[in-house]
Image (cartoon, rainbow, N blue to C red):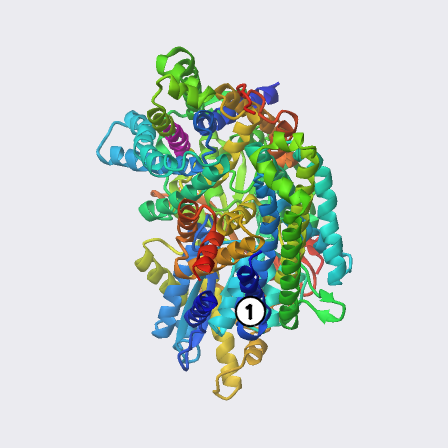
Amino acid sequence: MPQRMLAGLSVLVAILAAAPWWMPPWMLFIASGALAKGMAALGLMLLLRGGLVSFGHALYFGIGAYAAGLLVLSGITEFLVLAVLGTLATLVLALILGAFVSRYRGIFFGLLSMALSMVFYGLLIKLQSLGSSDGFNLGGIHLLSIPMQGTAGQVPTYLMTLVLSVLAAIGIDQFLRSRYGLLTKALRDNELRVEYLGQSVRQLVLLNYIIAAGLAGLAGVLSAVAVGHIGPEMAYWTTSGEFVFMVILGGLGHVAAAFVGAGVLSAVQAVAYAVAPNSWQFIVGASLLACIVFLPEGLWSLLKRFGRRA
Amino acid sequence: MSEAVAIFLDGSIYAAWLFLVAVGLTLVYGVMKIVNVAHGATYTVGAYAAVSLCGAWAAGGGNEWGIYLPLVLAAPVVGLILGPILERLFLRPLRDEEETVLMLVTYALFLILEDSVKFIWGVDPYFLSEPYLLPGGIDIFDLTYPVYNFGMLIAATVVGVGLAWFLSKSKSGRIVRAVIHDREVAMAMGANVDRIYLAVFSFGCALAALGGALTAPTVSVIPSMGVEVIVLAFAVVVIGGMGSIIGALLGALLVGFVRAMAVHLLPEAELFIIYLVMATVLLVRPSGLFAPAEARKI
Amino acid sequence: MKSFSLRALAIAVSATLAAVAPATQAAESVKIGVVTFLSGPAAGPFGVPARNAAEILIEGLNAGKVPGPHATKGFGGAPIQMVLVDEFGSTTTQVSEYRNLVQRQNVDIVVGYISSGNCLAIAPVAEELKKLTVIFDCGTPRLLEENAYKYVFRTNSHSGMDSIAAALYVASTKPGTKSYAGINQNYAWGQDCWSDFEGTMKAKLPAATVTTSQMPKLFAGQYGTEISALLAAKPDVIHSSFWDGDLEALILQAAPRGLFKKSVVILTAGETAIHKLGNAIPDGTVIGARGPHSVFAPDTEINRWFQQTYRDRYNTPPNYASYHMVQAILGAKTAYEKAKAAAGGADPTQEQIIAAFEGLTYESASGKVEMRNSKGHQAIQETAYGTTKMVKGQLTVTNVKRYPADMVNPPEGVKSADWIASGFKR
C-alpha cells in the first residue's frame, strides 16, 4: 500500500478514534451503526471480489443479532461471550448452508441467498415467543465491568465497534494479499482457469462465503448492542439491499471502501429523512443511479484520484 | 368435494393473477438478461393509469360496460411511454455492464418511480371497483365467485397463448428467440438488436402495467402496492425458470395451487411457503423447472 | 501536497458540523417532537391523519381556540413548537432519529409512534436520555406490561381492549354464536389481536368453536383464496384486525362474494375504512375504532370543535388515529399545566411533569382518559362497537354498545393475556 494512502488512512482512524470527544452523541450513535454495517458490507465486498453478489447477506446479520438476543434472554450479558458465540453461530450456519449455496453463480446465487434470508425472516415472524415482528430489547450488556449500553455505554460501544472494524479491515486486507485472496480475484475473471491452476473453486467460494457470513454476524451482534433492540427486519431483503448499496457506493478498490460506503449511505439517509421525509426513496434511488453511472468504481476511486493529484 | 373444487378454482384464479404479474418479468429477462426490479413500479403505474383513464371515461359519460376499454388500454399507454424512456435513457447506455449491476440500476429506477407516483397522484388511496362489481358473481358449490376473476383467468390465457404463438410462429417472434439464444450471432445475422430490445422492454412494461390495471379494481390503489408484488413475481419466475414463458405459467400454477392448499388445509404454513418452494427449486434445479437450455461459454 | 487532502477533509468535517449544529430554541416555547408515518403504507390511514390532527390542535391551542378545559393558550401559556419526524424505516433508523430529536433538536417532549416495534425499541432510549415520551398509538400490550418506565407514557388503551370488546359485543348481540373464524395479518399485531379475541370468546361463549384462522402475510393484497376458505367454513362470526390497504382490499374482494351476508364480520380497526369506503361496506358489519373515537365520540364542545376544524381544513372527518394524537397532546398539556401550578407558576421540570402525569385523569375529544395502569403510565379508556347501516346514502353505526374501561382493560399489575386466560378475574 502506498505510503500516502497508509498515512491518510491512519489519520482517518485517529480522527474516528477521537470521535467521542468531538462528535455530538446523536452523531456518535449513527457512526456506531455505520461502522457495524460497514463490517457487514466488508464481507459482502469480499464475496463480490470473487464474483458473487448476495442479495440475502442480511440473513447472517440477523442471525448474529438473534444469537446475541437469545443469549441475553438466557441471562448472558457479557459482550465478549455474545460476540464470540454470535459470530460462531453464523460461521457454523454458513458452513452448512454454504455447502449447498456455494455451487451457484451469478443471479441464481443472488436469488437463492435472498430466498434463504426471507425464509429466516418468515420464521422470525412466526415465532411469537420472540416477539414476532416487534422483536425484543436487549439490556444490561457489558464488557467485563464496562457498561456497553445506556448513556455510559455509548462511548465504549463505539470504540469497540471501531476497534473491531479496523481489525476486520486489516484482517481482510491481509487475506486479499494472501494466496487465497489473489485467487479470489481470479475467480471473478475466470473460474475454470482457477480450477486448472489447482485450486478447488468450491473450497475457495465456501471459504469466502464463511468469512463474509462471520463478518455479517459480528456486525449483527454489534448492532444489537448499540441499538438495544433486534427485530426481523434485520433479515429482510431491503437490509440486504442496503449492504449491496454500500458496497456499490464504496467500490471494490480497498477494504476501507466498504466503510466509506456505509458512512456515506448513513449520512445520505439521515439528511434525506430530515429534508424530504416524503421523497427520501427518490433521493436514495437517484444517488444509487448516479453512483453506478458516474462512479462505477465507487467513491473510493474519487479518493484515489484526489490522493494522486496531491 | 366442494373443498377440492374450491382449492382448484382458487389456485387457478391466483395462478392467473400471478402469471399476469410475472410474465413481463420473465420475458424481459429471457431476451435482455436483465432482472427488472422496476417491474414492480411499472405495475403500480399501470394501476394508477387505469384509475385515471377509467375515471376520465366515467366522467366523460362513457358507457358502463365500456369501462373495460380504458382499463385495458392503460397497459399499452404505460408501455409505450415508460418503456422507451427507461430503456433508452438508462438501460441501453449500461447494456454491457454485468447482470447484477443492471439489476441494481432497475432497483434504483424502482425507488425513483415509486416516489414519482406519489408526486403525480398523491398518497391517498384510489378506488376503481366498478369493473370488478359490474359482472356480478357466480355460485359454484355454494361459494360465490366474482365473474371478474374468471375474466382475469381468460385474460391470462389470452396473454399466455398469444405470447407463445408469437414467439414460436411469427417471424419477429422467431427473431426474438434467436436473440434470446445468442445475441451476438443474431446481430451478425442482421437482427436489429437495439430495436428488438426496445420493443421487448416496452412490451414487458405493458404486461406489468396490464397486471396492475387488472388488479386495480380489486384493491385500494396505493403507491406501495408494487413492493410485495415484485417479490412474488420473482419467486414465480425463479421457480418456473427465468426466461421461459411456459415456466412462468407452470411456476404460477405451482405456487397458486400450493398456496390454495395451504390456505384451505394448513393456514399456518402460508407465510413463507413460497420462499421455501423457491429455495427448494433453486437448490434442486437452479435454472428453474423449465428454463431454456443455455450454451456455456468457456 | 499531503495537506491538500487533509485540508479538504478538515473543511468538509467542519462544514458538516456547522450544518448540523444543534438548533437553538426560542425562549419560553415548549418544543414537541411529533413522530408518525409520513410515507409508506401506514401513512395514509394513520400517520397523515395523526399529523393533521397534531397540526390543527397545536395551532388551536396556541391561538387559545380550543374550548372546554383546555382553553389555556399553548402549554400553560407557552406557545407550542412542533418538530415533525417520519416514522418510516427500520427500527435502528427510528432509534437514531429519536436520539437526533432529543439531543440535537432539544425537544422538551416527544409524542409519537404507531409501530409497536419502534415503541418497544424507543422506550429504553427515552429512559436513558431522560426525555418525557408520550406514545400515542402503538398497540402492543407488552410495552408497559412487561417493563416499568419512568419517562414513557401511553395515552391510548392497547390492542387487548379492541379484541376483548369485540368478543363482548358478539356475546351480547349474538349469544347463539356457534362458530367463529378469523382473518388477521400474520405479524405481531394480527397474532395478538386474534389470540385476545379467541381467549375472550373461550371465556364468554365457551360453546362456540373456531372453524378456521386465516393469517395471510402483511400487505398480501389478494385474499381470494382466504375468502373462499372462510366462505367454506361457514362461521357465524368472523374477526379481523386488518387495517387500511389490506382492510380495503378485503372489503372490496369479500363483499361481492357474500361473505358479509353469510357471517357477521367484525372489523376491530374498521373505523378508518368507513370514511373512504363508506358505501362499499355492507350493512350489518361490526366496526371498532380502537376506543370511543370518531363516530363513537361524545357530543362535547371540544369534540365539536375538533370535528369542525379538521373537516374544514382537510375535507374529510378525523379518524381514530387523529383522536389518539389529540389525546396524547392534551394529556401532556394537562400534566404540564398541573405541574406548573404545583410549582407555583414556574416552568416545570421533566420530573414534575411526570409526577403530575402519573395517575392523571383528563378529558380528551373522545371523553375521559384515566392514566391508571402500569403505575400511572398506561391509560385506560372505555370503548365502543357498533353495527353499520346505510341511512339515506350515508353510513351510520347503530346498536352501539359502550364498554366501560374496567370491563375491557386489565386491573393494575395484571398482564392482559393473563387476565383473559384467568377468565377476567378482578
**Residue found farthest to the left:** B60
Q: Position of residue B11 (x, y in %)?
A: 55, 24
Residue C145, placed above or below residue C75: above
Residue B264, placed above or below residue A46: above
Amino acid type, callout 1: Ile
Is residue B13 inside the magenta stretch? no
Q: Position of residue C215 (x, y in %)?
A: 60, 39
Q: Position of residue C226 (x, y in %)?
A: 56, 32
Q: Quadrant of residue B283?
A: top right
Q: Position of B25 compared to A155: left or right?
A: left
Along the line of sight, the residue nearer the viewer: A244 or C102: A244
Is residue B210 inside the magenta stretch? yes
Along the line of sight, the residue nearer the viewer: B154 or C364: B154
Asked if residue B291 can be seen in this view, the reply is: yes
Which residue is found at the position 48% from the left and 31% from the top? C258
Along the line of sight, the residue nearer the viewer: A228 or A194: A194
- For mark 1, name the chain: A
Which residue is found at the position 68% from the left and 67% from the top? A148
Along the line of sight, the residue nearer the viewer: C34 or B226: B226
Q: Position of C306 compared to A57: left or right?
A: left
Which residue is found at the position 50% from the left and 67% from the top? C100
Element carrying mark 1: helix
Instruction: State whether the magenta stretch is mostly helix, strand or loop.
Output: helix
Residue for badge 1: A15
Asked if residue C149 can be seen in this view, the reply is: no
Q: Which residues are magenta?
A: B204-217
Residue A35, placed above or below residue B255: below
